[in-house]
Amino acid sequence: MSNKTNVRDPIHNYIYMTDVEESVVQHPLFQRLRYISQNGSAYYTYPSNRHDRFLHSLGVMKIGGDIFLNATEDLQDKDVRNFLIKAYQYIKTQATIVGVNIIAVTDDFIEKKNQTFIKYGLNLDEDVKFVKNELTKEDSNTAFKLTKSILFQSLRLACLLHDVGHFPYSHTIEYALGDYISELQESQRELNQKEKEFLENYLSMKKFLKVETVDKALHEMIGIKILDEIIPSGNLNNFQRLCRTIAKQILTKQEQIPVLQTLYEVVSGELDADRLDYSLRDPKSSGLELGQIDMERLLNNFTIVTETIEKSETSETVENVETFRILPKVQALSTIETFYHQRYLNYKYLVYHHSKVRMDKIIGEITKKLVAIYFRTNSGAEWIKGILEKNNFHFLWSKINGTVRVATNEDNYFYCDEGWFNSLIKEIYYSRLDNNIIDNEIKSLLLLINTFIFRRTDNIVTLFKRYDKYLNFFDTLKIRIEKETHTTIDQKEFIKECFGLLFADGVIEVFKEKIKNKHDTILLMKSTPPKSISFDNEGNSELKIVVGTEKNVIPIHRLSPYLDSLKLMNDSDQLFHIFLIGENIKTKEIGSLIENELCDFMQNIYIEELVKK
């Protein structure tokens, strides 16, 4: 009999693991997540914020499994029964594709007697003959329990591995590499051999994973690859092998299979396990008192609803397709309001805190410059490239390719953590003493590294540190434009239009270059879209809620004036930060000067756009 392996967690108390989950957690590529911070460089602003992707992933796994089991608990509910019947049919098909039959899967599951499944009430009757007879009936309680066991394990594996592909400093370096990939794809110049190989490897990875037409983040694609590498099918029994296959299908977001789409929304949806965990974990780790979320009430009020949607293969054929959604009941409304409130504040005061955002942007800018040096060495940067090669900088993108191999303890990607990255940039900074630095780009790189590793806040100015300065800037800009054009401008729409113009392709780069040349100052900019509830184009909330015994599905904002009011936050909150970086820049008092130049720049591009209209 397998013992219950557990981890003590400050958020969820004990998190119990099955055998296959434990083997994943013990793998070096998962252990690597201990050294990948959950909130990037937030610890510079909130020193206690030292939690990592490792524990977050375990938390997501627990919540995801709990959501699924609670949603499928009521076997008298016709929607639940219908979902489990469809899921059982899908599972049997997948078992055949994997090369086993459902009886072999069941035998392995019963024989293992895993205590974690027993704890969750998912153990099957030990009378094998009885079980096999029951499995011939798709609507039997035995078939339902086996189906729930397989989907429970598959979903938990998908949740556990949803972040395993993350780079050091999480999204920050991911975005920097993503920008570089976009630059190569859009470049008009002749790429060198290394650049061509890098781009070809990226495209081959998308093709290999069959996600060419799916919007997948870089870390998600790498995570799907890693799933194959750290859970090789040869080491698994039939039950585990089937669950591994389904977990991968969940993560690749195969929308054409209704059962998978239902489970995918638990991993990544409007009210998913990922968001629920970090909305609890991030504030607590940072010392922010944002209130409590009644998780038990929420988890106990998930259910499954059946929806029929129209799917058109061609302009002439329309087919009604039955789909399923895991949605909260109206009884959980108070908890959902608390969740969205806390998530909004978590982003506003932690993730989007100007001091945290600027350090993240500095890491990203350092990465971009190092990648450019590695692939396109300019005269005077050979010593930096030598350090990058010595420290195996290419390990950072070692998973970006179209091949899969069984990962070992010596897997390159294991070493790509924040300690490795910090050591690398520290060595570059230390080695500056042995080199005569005359290149301005290298000087900029060293300034950024110095600012980051020593937290040189005297090197940084935030233009709109507080919301009042942000509004004052746009009030001034609006008055100037109205005076010049003799028009009246709506303030809310005006700010959104300015944001769109500023973030249009290449626009901000023009201003950055001007500031660099004129003031010897680095300008960095980061969008900070408010994270509240999502609304569609018709003004309805994306999240639906289930009301009454008839299970009516209603956009949740209609039942919550508070959630409906979050539209105002989406339209009115601060949309971006701008930072200036220069040696001892705070003593030079050029922040207000550059702010005025930004006002002039935006006034010109806004009026140019008006003329075009």
Image (spheres, rainbow, N blue to C red):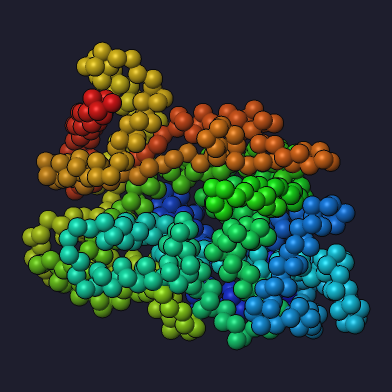
| Residue 587 seen by the camera | yes
Of the 4 image quadrants, the one containing the N terminus is bottom right
Is 430 situated left or right of 328 in this image?
A: left
Of the 4 image quadrants, the one containing the C terminus is top left
Look at 74% across and 41% down and name the residue there: 546
| Residue 426 seen by the camera | no
Where is residue 333? Give x, y as percent. 71, 38
> Foreground residue, 389 or 197?
197
Look at 85% across and 64% down and name the residue there: 139
Look at 57% across and 78% down and name the residue there: 231
Toward the front, the furthest residue is 316
Look at 70% across and 36% down and name the residue there: 554
> Foreground residue, 116 or 41?
116
Whether 7 is drawn above or below 326: the answer is below
Quadrant position of residue 102: bottom right
> Foreground residue, 393 or 134?
134
Where is residue 581? Give x, y as percent. 23, 46
Where is residue 433? Give x, y as percent. 14, 67
> Foreground residue, 533 or 185?
185
Is 437 situated left or right of 165 in this image?
A: left
Quadrant position of residue 92: bottom right
Quadrant position of residue 511: top left
Where is residue 327? Give x, y as percent. 70, 47
Is 297 situated left or right of 596 in this image?
A: right
